[in-house]
Amino acid sequence: MNISEIKTSFKEIERITQKHFNKLGCERLKEVLETWDANLMESRDKTKYRHHGRVKTVIKTVMGEVEYERVEYQILDGDGKTRYVYLLDEAMGETGVGYFSELLSEQIVQACCESSYRNAARAVSEMTGQTISHAAAWTVVQEFGAQVDEEEKRSAELAAENKGVGAIETKLLFEEHDGIWLSMQGKSRKDRGDRVEMKVAIAYDGAEKVGKKRYKLTNKVACANFGPAGDFIWRKDGVVAGTYNVDEIEIRILGGDGASWIKQSQTDDSVHFQLDQYHRNKAIVQYVSDPDARETIRDLLYAKDIELLLSVIETYSLSTDDEEERENYQRLYIYFQNNKDGLVPYHRRGLQLPAPPEGKEYRRMGAMESNIFTLIGNRMKGRRHCWSINGGNNLARLLCLKHTGKLTGILDSLSAHVLPARYAQEVTVDYSASVVPQHEGKGYNGFKQSFIPSSMKWMKDLVGMKPLSEMKFN
């Protein structure tokens, strides 16, 4: 059929073509999996794995549903109990979530980090050969979020034992903390109230210039959780220790709005707290209505005369006859008194700071207001979004990874699935011992490098695909 004779739009041609190749891809993937399973059957330890028949299963992929058969084996455990296994499933590893492939699962997670579960499911369905419901998208996010939760806990436990695995070395580390209030639903709403504060923290070792007046935080990590303060700090320390060699850190600059849970990170003299200047200046505007008084307070802050500043605010409070004005001055006095050690910015305290690494700068703190929106607020706040504690925590973990550039790598590590090298054409990949799964059984050794069988001509056909004008459509 001549393409020029088709009485339809290019969009429709594109849709038909995608559908055709999705179907072809599913057929070929079925062939790959069943051939792989047949090779495992031949190379297995026949004294250990007894053939027990073939069982059909389905895996959802970006091309569509792939139905295939694999052999079930009967084996005896060490205690003499019988159990049944699939060598193909073990070789593939955890294939995504439930019956979702890793690639499809990762696309769902990426989409859910950008928009609601319903919109993400619709977008993935439109871009793949698969139909995804919003409930399925939610399930995938919860599964991956729970796995990231386990990784966070392991990192926190190692950090508590001074066994962090972070490799980046820096003598100065910046940390900024803040909270964002999110609406609750269901049982979480009943137990915790209409709104609950999610605690958020970022850490970075400096900033690099990426434009005329634009800077990017370097080696940024992030953590977010609804949990209590102690648990959050524990997790945050684990996230930091998972990236940075904390033994090399000599000074930490801790920024925040003065909340008590933030100051729990101020554990020793090496941690210098700084009251976030946005919240500091906002308090002055909120509690002081007299322009001249505001100017006096700002001048004393700039002069770093904190004791005189507190004395002046107290005097203003005692000298006014307006009850509301007096209470506002008292609120400002208490706020500044509780955070007086952090009223002067770190860069104006005369601290002996190490020189920044080449190509980096130590910028003034205050990145948290932007980051808390980018990390959490843009996806999870407003638009009638409501969350359960667990559901919100799971999505927040993935959002933190996404916006620090670590999501793809983490998803790959959580759903590692590598086809044997013989199913790739002229591609050689080296895997470390920690990546290649170890299994018992004769000939079952992690799949040594080899090439795709010549019978699988379809892969070569895809590489040398003809132009659209030369293709025939049935």
Image (cartoon, rainbow, N blue to C red):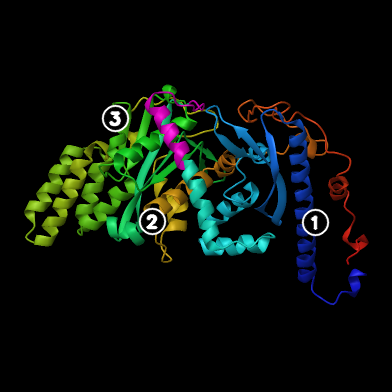
Residue 152 is covered by the magenta coloring: yes
Q: Which residue is denoted by mark 3 in the rendering? A: 267
User: Mark 2 packing: few (<14 Cα in 10 Å), some, or many (20+)?
Assistant: some
Query: Which residues make up the magenta segment?
Result: 149-169
Image disc number at residue 315? none
Q: Nearer the viewer, residue 187 or 52?
A: 52
User: From the viewer's perspective, is 210 left or right of 397?
Assistant: right
- At horizontal 91% and vertical 63% (from top left) the residue drawn is 472
Q: Up-down: is 350 above or below 148?
A: above
Q: Secondary structure at mark 1?
A: helix
Q: Which residue is denoted by mark 2 in the rendering? A: 388
Q: Secondary structure at mark 2?
A: loop
Question: Reading the chain from its start, which is encountered first: label 1 or label 3?
Answer: 1
Q: Which residue is denoted by mark 1 in the rendering? A: 24
User: Does the image show residue 350?
Assistant: no
Q: Secondary structure at mark 3?
A: loop
Q: What percent of the width, then of the height, locates residue 136?
A: 55, 58
Q: What percent of the width, then of the height, locates residue 446?
A: 69, 29
Give the residue type that dot 1 points to: Leu
Q: Quadrant of residue 158?
A: top left
User: Does the image show residue 437?
Assistant: yes
- At horizontal 22% and vertical 48% (from top left) the residue drawn is 297
Task: Select label 2 or label 1 by which is in front.
Answer: 1
CA distance for labels 2 and 1 = 41 Å
Question: Reading the chain from its start, which is encountered first: label 2 or label 1?
Answer: 1
